[in-house]
Amino acid sequence: MRALHWPIVALVIALAAGCAMPARTPEPPDRTGPRIDVIWVPSDLVVARKMLEAAGVGRGDVVYDLGSGDGRIPIMAAKEFGARGVGVEIDPALIKQSRANAITAGVADRVTFVEQDLFTADIGEATVVAIYLGQDVNLKLRPKLLAELRPGTRVVSHDYDLGDWAPERTMTVDLESRDHRVFLWRVPAR
């Protein structure tokens, strides 16, 4: 045998004899990073536009998107509806992408992205809140929406309702892939 193969042969012999190197203990998962309750699945742009239309978004609005992903809803609110947008997102990579998307769209002066957990974010300034989070997260978020948002604030959700809080409107958006639902609520007077 050529000398180049001897290290490999020695390793095979050691493995067969049970003299292999000790197994490396895997590193524990990093538990210091953000706790993500929902994986990001972007709302189709047609659905995002329908959400903003359903909420009647206009120039005087401040649209908060909780779990804003790549920033498409706050950016669309600013670019197409003239509103101010705020994206709340826990994933720093998506925050970075959102900021770059806002620059590309020419609305970086009217859109802000905050790296924060949506359950601890200050949302009191919102006149519209957009969510696409999943049923369990929506139900967990509902008390915060009712406690922190001013009466009359519109809440719009893609596909998932808010339990026994009856929506003001429910719309269906037909796309080739499947039908999507859009729900609209207004925060009631206290």
Image (tube, rainbow, N blue to C red):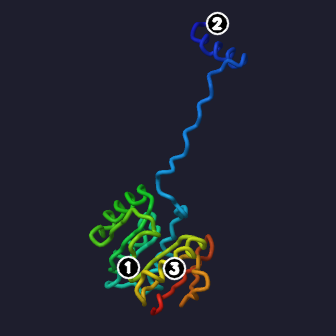
Residues at marks 2 and 1 touching, judged by CB atoms closer than 8 Å: no
Q: Which amino acid does label 3 sit on?
A: Pro
In the picture of the structure, the residue carrying the numbered disc 1 is 124
Kind of residue indicated by mark 2: Met
Ranked by sequence position, the earlier of labels 1 and 3 is: 1
Dot 3 corresponds to which residue?
143
Query: Quadrant of residue 14 in the image?
Result: top right
Query: Residue sitting at 69 percent across and 19 percent down?
Result: 15
Q: Name the residue under label 2.
A: 1
* Mark pair 1, 3: CA separation: 13 Å
Is residue 7 left or right of 96 when viewed as pictured? right
Determine whether the residue tagged by mark 2 lies in a helix, strand or loop: loop
Q: Position of residue 175 (x, y in %)?
A: 58, 75
Foreground disc of the pair 2, 1 = 1
Q: Nearer the viewer, residue 99 or 128?
A: 128
Q: Which amino acid does label 1 sit on?
A: Gly
Q: Which secondary structure lies at badge 1? A: loop
